[in-house]
Amino acid sequence: MTDLGRKQVCGNVYGGLFGIAAIVAAGLFVSSSASAQSTQTAWQAFQIRCLLPFEDFKPPIVDDLVPVAGRDGVYQLDKGAMLIVGGEEDLGTRSCSVEGTGLVRGYKEWSALVLQTGIYQETDTPGLWMSHEWIEPRIIVEKIPGKIRVVESLLEA
């Protein structure tokens, strides 16, 4: 099991405060373990296993997941969703994404919150958000149909 204590979730001032605010705003409950995957929506899995660790300069949380046979960096989540860890040569150095259903509601709540706080800014490309001045390298969050991913970019704030 992976400890999601205060240090990991709130590792940096802006990212940690944003992460906690996003969880509260979305009405999510984060237990002390990410192993309760059967109760996580695809959005919650993305937020807990991908986004919050990237905001805290940590790798995605996959140690309690079952790898998909024959697919390097792909892990099975609940309800047929998958978590994919890899590099994104088109946008940056490393990435973590979740494919599955149930991403839209969480994404809408998250994007409304970050629009209000200014921690992330939407780019000219709809569904493509970039962290704003609080973290280097900058983090990119992208929502495409059936998938959401976070990328550690090569860009500075």
Image (tube, rainbow, N blue to C red):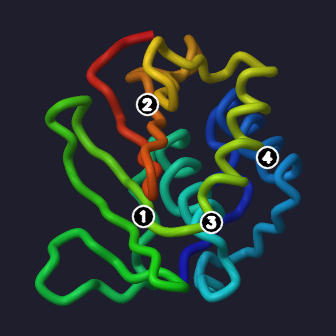
- Residue at 49% across, 15% down: 123
Mark pair 2, 1: CA separation:
17 Å
Establish if 131 lies above or below 27.
above
Residue hosting label 4? 20
Q: Residues within 10 Å of mark 1 (few under 14, many from 20)?
A: many
At x 14%, y 36%, the residue is 89
- Mark 3 and mark 2: span between their CA atoms? 20 Å
Q: Earlier in the sequence, mark 4 or mark 3?
A: 4
Image disc number at residue 140: 2
User: Which label's residue is closer to the chain start, 1 or 4?
Assistant: 4
* Callout 2 secondary element: strand
Q: Position of residue 106 (x, y in %)?
A: 70, 53
Question: What residue type is disc 4 on?
Answer: Ile
> Who's the residue at 61% across and 72% down the image?
3
Task: Point out the image quarter for the N terminus.
Answer: bottom right
Look at label 2 and name its amino acid. Ile
Frontmost residue, 77 versus 153: 77
**Of discs 4 and 3, which sits in the foreground?**
3
Q: Amino acid at mark 3?
A: Gly
Q: Residues within 10 Å of mark 4 (few under 14, many from 20)?
A: some
Q: Secondary structure at mark 1?
A: strand
Q: Is residue 24 above or below residue 13?
A: below
Q: Earlier in the sequence, mark 3 or mark 2?
A: 3
Spatial CA distance of label 3 from label 1 is 9 Å
